[in-house]
Image: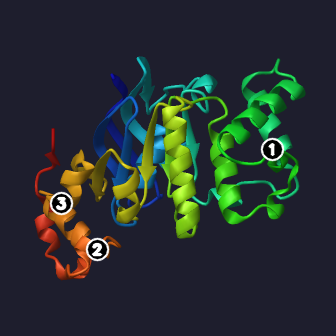
Amino acid sequence: MGTLVDARDIRGVYYTGGQDVVAVDNVSIRIEEGEVLGLAGESGSGKTTLGSIISLIARPPLHVERGTLEIDGQVQELGGDAKVPRTWRGAVVSMLPQGAMNSLSPTKRIRHLVYDVMRSHDRKISRDEAMDRARQRITTLGLPARVLDAYPHQLSGGMKQRTVTIISTLLNPRLLVADEPTSALDVTSQKILIEMLLEMLREKIISGVIFVTHDLPVLRTVATNIGVMYQGRLVERGPTQIMVDSPAHPYTKALMSSVLAPEPKYSHTRIEGMSSFDRSLFDAPAVIHR
């Protein structure tokens, strides 16, 4: 397996017209082919902003000041006057947005949305070709073909989330950035969605995933590695088991100890709130586990 994603020195700032806010502060991450990188942290830590920048959908007031994104050997400079080729969005990297269940138009059947997505990248594709490809993808990933003829309100929350996931990956992007994809789902629907993402990796529909969430128990089940963000910086990164059982950075330790995990071995672990920790300790140097 080789390196799939190499994002270097990414800096993103929200221009507020007053005091600008640095949301991503010179962050670099590398993802291997077949890897699921979980990004964790409190609300406001910069994880969703980093996901938006890497998926090339940053919009004002967020401005990318600098950075380099290399995916599967293709290099794209970020920030300034850099132009992103249309072919990158959706085909090289794709975003599964936060609140994805609300991103489906209530006035369109799913098949119309599918055709719009595919035709926006291939003007020559016919409606029949688009539907055949979508039907095959949907049934391969465990949804009934009738989903294509449904309106969003006719689908359950879990089915809508899985449908949006399929639409986001119709062009077989090398990297999928999934922003809080399980946050609005019940436990059963979370499990089904995670299994779908892992199946996409096995079938090489996608080659890597950045899984953004504040739900650390979910990351235990899906992530190959975990990166923890604090105040726009990546403060620790390493294999999931190390990050869960032996975190080294003070912020990661605080974050892990503030989460109630469902596993039996954590049943007698004392839970500490983040407010009980001395935040001055969180400015310690970043820790990268090899």
Between discs 3 and 1, the one toward the N terminus: 1
Residue that mark 1 sits on: 145
Image quadrant where one finds the C terminus: top left
Q: CA distance from mark 2 to mark 3?
A: 14 Å
Q: Say which residue appears at 78% left-offset and 39% top-offset.
A: 114
The location of residue 42, given as percent across then percent down, is 35, 66
Residue that mark 2 sits on: 264
Q: Is residue 264 left or right of residue 185?
A: left
Residue that mark 3 sits on: 245
Q: Say which residue appears at 69% left-offset and 41% top-offset.
A: 167
Badge 2 amino acid = Pro
The location of residue 276, given as percent across then percent down, is 19, 82
Q: Say which residue appears at 63% left-offset and 56% top-offset.
A: 100
The location of residue 155, given as percent across then percent down, is 77, 61
Q: CA distance from mark 2 to mark 1?
A: 39 Å
Badge 3 amino acid = Asp
Please identify, in this view, whether the residue under mark 2 or under mark 1 is nearer the observer: 2
146 and 248: which one is in front?
146
